[in-house]
Amino acid sequence: MDFSGFNLNFLSKLLTTGVSLLATWNPSEQHAKCLSLKSSLALDNTTILDVSYVSAGTTVRPYGTPHESCMKKAHISAPLCRVQFSTATSATSAVRGEAWLPDEWYGRFLGLGNGGLDGCMYYNELDYGSALHFATVGTNNGHDGRVGHPFLGNEEVLNDFAFRSIHIEAVIGKQIVAEYYGRPHAKAYYIGCSTGGRQGTQTALKYPEDFDGIIAGAPATDFNRLLHWAGTLSRYVGAPNINSAPTFITPELWKFVAQEILNQCDGIDGVVDGIITEPDACEFRPEELLCDGNGNSKCLTRLQVEALRKIYSPLYGNGELIYPRFDPGSEGISPLLFAGKFPLSTTDWLKYAVLNTSDFDFSEYGPQHGRLMDDINPGGIATFDGDFSAFRDRGGKFLTYHGRGDPLIPSGNSKRVYDLVARTLGPASLDAFYRLFLVPGMGHCKDGPGAARFGQLGGQNAVNASAHNVLLALVDWVEGGMAPDTIIGTAEDGATRVHCRYPQRSIWDGGAYVCEE
Ligand SMILES: *[C@@H]1O[C@H](CO)[C@@H](O)[C@H](O)[C@H]1NC(C)=O
Ligand SMILES: *[C@@H]1O[C@H](CO)[C@@H](O)[C@H](O)[C@H]1NC(C)=O
Ligand SMILES: *[C@@H]1O[C@H](CO)[C@@H](O)[C@H](O)[C@H]1NC(C)=O
Ligand SMILES: [Ca+2]
């Protein structure tokens, strides 16, 4: 990534102090100041593991082994001071983090989230933030690696994962920033997707003072039920015993299903382009694919059709909605839930955080396990609460987005959370502080046939202006009071599309997509 030409026009004007600071610091002074942090930083419960001054264009080693850090390389675009630390959160748990402090700092703090059940420091995100002149901090979420085994028998590690690591990131990170630059940050931001979206949501609810602006992408909210939904969908097609499952649908057949869904629903939005703008308007009829006895191999049995009907219906239990349905149009992007394995997140969460065992036979999995996850709700991880009043009242801005072709977390859940917040806080519009952008044709956090690049994580290669970049848009909102009405995304082929904020709809007016009430 090269952001050297980035011209944060409006933004840099707002924070000219950041620029004058530069002028008074020469590189050798900065270098020396950086290295002195090793001994000058005295932070509660915190050990400074390493401090180094790194020049632009270099590649450095992630902390620990590749398995622990989840990434093999750490690329550095902007010259910066790299601080590695570890903060004890209890007698049996710790959060390890890194602060990347760019030479050219505009006074902003940026916290990063995690993904899945990890445990991973995302060095490409530290690079993204620091190249945009944010003092950027990420953590390992309280444990290393991608699996849930560290939760077994350690409630404090669970607490770090469920709600604490982002708070530590904010509290400790801000102190490191203030010590290095000699003054506190002006505004604090957060960006994350998936589990990172849930962490951002949890932080707004539980620690509303930590951030002035939060970007929560495809949030894994109502977490226990989400994992139950994912496990249940994989069971519909036979996981974990697909060899004996008459309902299993091969990857080859999924392509055929995906095409049939497009045949039925692509044109509803007025344009046949491989993108279903509003999946909720698609009433997919899988029976069209039933074998007719004419020896056609590209067809489905009655049991497979039955499985599809369940997959594309909301999940109910005891008459209550448990989770919205799988978005039609997502299956072409990545049919992970249907590959035959029971999903890893559900597997590890149920075993290590809920049942407290390393041994469980997932052919026994059923609705009772969903209820158990929900009842125990380890660490209060659910994150399904509409009371954002404390965050709103302290002036916080919340920007959330969700791909309409997300095969791992249904976009309907973000609508559901929006409606919950609206109901909880009263009938007035949420527009003043909470905006949800729905992104047609985008998969999980990124990718897909849609205009899926708009400066979010995984879609960093966006045009360098607030209208095209959610992070810069959030800065304009927090610092300039200019709320984003739309976000313009860019597709792989360079085409752009305006993404609308819920409850507005994206409508084809014959020449372009526009947003309408
Ligand atoms: C960013 O935008 C400015 C104009 O606003 C332009 O001069 C610069 O080259 C752009 N940088 C990149 C990396 O696209
Ligand atoms: C340090 O850790 C202890 C418990 O391990 C906690 O009670 C205390 O609040 C922590 N200090 C800070 C500043 O977080
Ligand atoms: C597993 O351990 C946690 C934490 O001690 C506890 O809350 C939970 O109830 C246990 N699960 C079961 C099924 O007993
Ligand atoms: Ca279409």
Image (tube, rainbow, N blue to C red):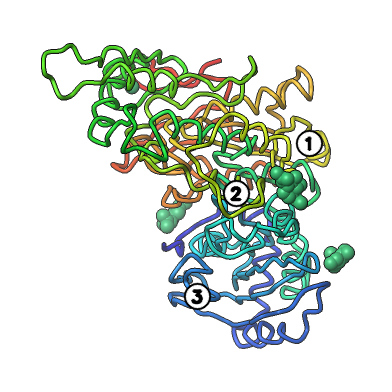
Say left or right for 297 vs 437: left
Quarter of the image containing the N terminus? bottom left
Tell me if mark 1 has few (under 14), some (14-19) or many (20+) residues whose alpha carbon lies within 10 angstroms of its own: many
Q: Looking at the picture, how far across and down is residue 285, in whole percent?
A: 34, 12
Q: Position of residue 107 (x, y in %)?
A: 69, 62
Mark 1, secondary structure of its residue: helix
Q: In the image shown, does 447 or 28 lie closer to the viewer?
A: 447
Position above or below: 22 against 159: below
CB atoms of marks 3 and 2 within 8 Å: no
**Contact between labelled residues 1 and 2, with CB atoms less than 8 Å apart:** no
Placement of 188 over or under 91, stated as above or below: above
Residue at left offset 50%, top offset 36%: 231
Q: Nearer the viewer, mark 2 or mark 1?
A: 2
Marking on residue 351: 2
Q: Which of marks 1 and 2 precedes in the sequence?
A: 2
Above or below for 234 versus 21:
above
Q: Quadrant of ligand 2?
A: bottom right
* Kind of residue at disc 3: Thr
Q: Disc 1, ligand 2: is the CB inside 8 Å?
A: no
Residue at 71 percent of width and 30 percent of height: 432
Q: CA distance from mark 3 to mark 1?
A: 41 Å
Q: Position of residue 123 (x, y in %)?
A: 51, 65
Residue at label 1? 392
State which quadrant residue 264 falls in.
top left
- Residue type, label 2: Lys
Q: Amino acid at mark 1?
A: Arg
